[in-house]
Amino acid sequence: MRIPITDVTPESERAVVIGWINEVRDLGGLAFYILRDRTGFLQVTIVKKKAPEAVIAAAKEASRESVVRVTGTVKATEKAPGGRELIPETFEIISRAESPLPLDVSEKVPAEIDTRLDNRYLDARRPRVAAIFQIRSAVTHAISNLFYEEGFTNITTSKIVAAATEGGTELFPLAYFEKEAFLNQSPQLYKQMMMAAGFEKVYEIAPIFRAEEHNTTRHLNEATSIDVEISFADHNDVMDLLERVIVRAYTSVAESCGPALEALGAEFEIPNTPFPRITYAEAIDIAALSIEEEIGYGDDLSTAAERAIGEEMGEHYFITDWPTEIKPYYAMPYEDEPSICKAFDLMHPRMELSSGAQRIHEHDLLTTQIAAKGLSPESFSFYLQPFRYGMPPHAGWGLGMERLIMTMLDLPNIREAVLFPRDRHRVTP
């Protein structure tokens, strides 16, 4: 019976392994085949004077990245990966790989990001790449566990919608029978409707779609959003939750992903809490001191401004109390100063990770705010209707999974954090 490579030890005495040929070294009388599976590496050592002829013949035909099954005895040796080697009695080619390979899986020869993504099935065999997705899986698991511990209900909302979630035109249209529909840019409206349904605490981890014409290392047109909504909560309550989510994600990776972090060579630190909180006005003042471009109150934060503020803060931090006019219509204005709303962004020194707010739960005020943004309340009738029948106060946020992984692991490009990226130019594989 086949066992994972990491379970092969000298104490095993005999083993049957199946894996990919990561590397071949032929030294004349000796040949070394380094096998790889998702757990690690194992050296298969063929002594040509002693090995069965069938083993020598099959090994000679096997190319790098071919899948092979090897049966043999296990011996201890300090020179081999993991301190053991397999002396083969049988060597079977299950699936032979063509040569040359589109890219070097052993990582000795670097490849451009486009070449890697075009051949993602090969790229993902590389231990460093596989480590990113082992960590992403651990983060998803840890965050879901936290939500369940805190009494959340996992929901799934539609990704085909009739109107923009947050207004604007940054939507992908699609033909939906006789109608026009769009790919959803956020589950925002549905999360809020579930507050009217009495669910009180909901979360969703799912794709979102943004038709933004970016060509940067930190933007995607299909991303994964971690979304939360809580009844009877304000913006401070959900900022506290967001801190717990970030720390739980980092802590879980630190505790359970040691080999993956080692494969990445990542310098990893769990963020300190509480995260600092600065107001939008304070953030603008910090940026104005460091960047050449003019920035005034009411301007959105540019990439240069975010970078300047991040360098000053040096850690995760919140920007709070944003101007109402530059945040979505559903952000709750302060009662005593309606020009400022109870919205926030969670920032990493490199970029924005999350945005959220306490929401407007009053029907008439929400209708007024939709109209003030130049949108038609009639287009949002399905969304507005629940606000007529007892909508509790509520708050929530959306957190970008890829940006979380990118900043956690200090990846140079957000495409590294998603298996099959979708950006302005890439729709395959």
Image: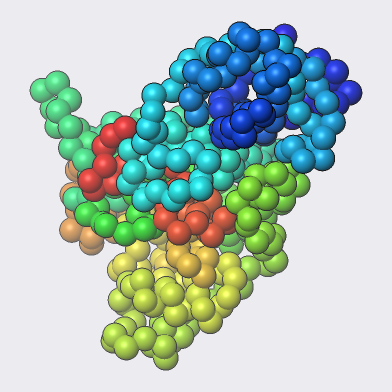
Query: Residue 325 at what x, y percent from top left?
Result: 30, 68
Query: Residue 26 at what x, y percent from top left?
Result: 59, 32
Left or right: 42 in relation to 132: right
Left or right: 211 in relation to 179: right
Between 116 and 102, the one lying in front of the other is 102
Task: State how the image is colored.
Answer: rainbow
Query: Residue 76 at what x, y percent from top left?
Result: 84, 31
From this view, report whether residue 228 is shown above or below residue 14. below
How many numbered marks have been drawn onto this rendered protein structure? Answer: 0
| Figure quadrant of the C terminus | top left
Between 411 and 19, the one lying in front of the other is 19
From this view, report whether residue 22 is shown above or below residue 295. above
- The answer to whether residue 202 is visible is no
Residue at horizontal 56 percent and vertical 69 percent from the top: 317
Residue at horizontal 72 percent and vertical 50 percent from the top: 254
Query: Residue 164 at what x, y percent from top left?
Result: 25, 44
| Figure quadrant of the N terminus | top right
Residue at horizontal 26 percent and vertical 57 percent from the top: 214
Between 153 and 250, the one lying in front of the other is 250
- The answer to whether residue 30 is visible is yes
Residue furthest out toward the left:
178
Residue at horizontal 45 percent and vertical 40 percent from the top: 104
Left or right: 110 in relation to 272: left
Q: Residue 101, located in which quarter of the rendered image? A: top left
Q: Residue 90, located in which quarter of the rendered image? A: top right
Residue furthest out toward the bottom:
289
